[in-house]
Image: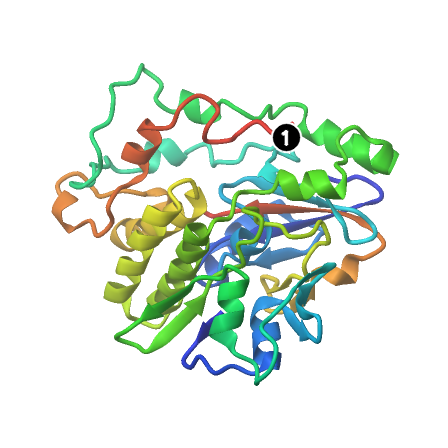
Amino acid sequence: MIVDHLDLTRAEFFAGTGWEIKPEGACKADVCVPLDPGGGFDAPATAERLGMSIVADDPTGLWAFGPESLGNRTLVSAEAPELVLPDVDGREFHLSSLRGQKVVIVSWAPY
Amino acid sequence: MHVNGLEVVTVSLELSGPDASRPYIEAARPEHPSLLDSEHRMDALFGVVNIPNVVWIDEDGMIVRPAEPGWPSARPELPSDLRASLPPVGRARTAPAVPERGPDPMALLRSGQSRDGYADAIRDWVARGAASEYALTPDEVVARSQPRSPDLSKGAAHFELANHLWRTGRRDLAVDHFNECHRLQPANWTYKRQAWSLVGNERVGGTYGRFVQGPLEGEEDSWPFASEFRSDTALVGEGEYYPKTM
């Protein structure tokens, strides 16, 4: 997630990271990580709790939030995250639209 | 691969626009979704670190095999005239010294995951579902997913910035972030090869410019990255490029 300010709303944080802020904490699939109680939503503090690195690009004033690092593994749950990507004709495709079928996602590159 | 009861989704990990991937997609004439992942979300979301790579997901949306090297189809991956059409490539000045290898330095890159049985393993799972020996439990899926330390998270953040800055014309800044990304995630080959291919493609162009992943001979001093494909892959050991997971 690339942002130009760090005081994100809960909705922005969820849209960019897939972690939803609930009373029990930051939640993704069946995993919830408790957050410090009280006050408003603090994106950098939440990112730190989730092991998300925040990297700055000083010349442009941009930041990038890296993916979570919990349990030292890429996946916190076997539930497939939602994946939304365009196809080669620009149409948006949602992985969740294939629910009900077995799927293999094959990654490749033109290099 | 066409198997009843299975949906194949392909994802191209390429920062440039659709035109880079379109020729390959059109040549394959797929009947399945062919997606473009310009930000390498597959790396951050699923743990893809090299290609070709396969993730298996069941009908309930549960991953049953996390991102791993895989060859679902028997088609050759690289164009047959590729090798002959690439110009001689030098080494990055800052690349580590590499050991002398035998007559086929690429042989080690082909070691590791067995390619021949991969499609049959998928067919076994399609036929038998959770009863297939290849379908992992949720705990196994999480445990066998790629490592993710704070440093690796940082590397992914640097990649995302590099990607954004390259596409918005700040290539000088992008290169710094690519180099930091590679330093933090040395085992992620798509992060490396994506970056190298961008410059290779600019300098060579043509059908296969993206496969030039190092400085042209004589242009080593203007190569902006800390290393390149020849030097980095010369350090790869047996079974390290495509680790055996099946």
Quadrant housing the C terminus of chain B:
top right
- Residue at 64% x, 52% y is A76
The single residue placed furthest to the top in the displayed view is B102
Label 1 environment density (alpha carbons within 10 Å; few <14, some 14–19, many ≥20): few
Q: Is residue A81 left or right of residue B204?
A: right
Q: Position of residue B187 (x, y in %)?
A: 42, 40
Q: Position of residue B125 (x, y in %)?
A: 80, 34
Q: Position of residue B155 (x, y in %)?
A: 40, 54
Quadrant housing the N terminus of chain B:
top right
Residue at numbered disc 1: B74
Subunit under mark 1 = B
| Image height of B163 relative to B61, above or below | below
Q: Secondary structure at mark 1?
A: loop
Q: Is residue B189 left or right of residue B63?
A: left
| Camera-nearest residue between B70 and A27 | A27
Residue B140 sits in quarter: top right
Q: Position of residue A26 (x, y in %)?
A: 64, 68
| Camera-nearest residue between B18 and A2 | A2
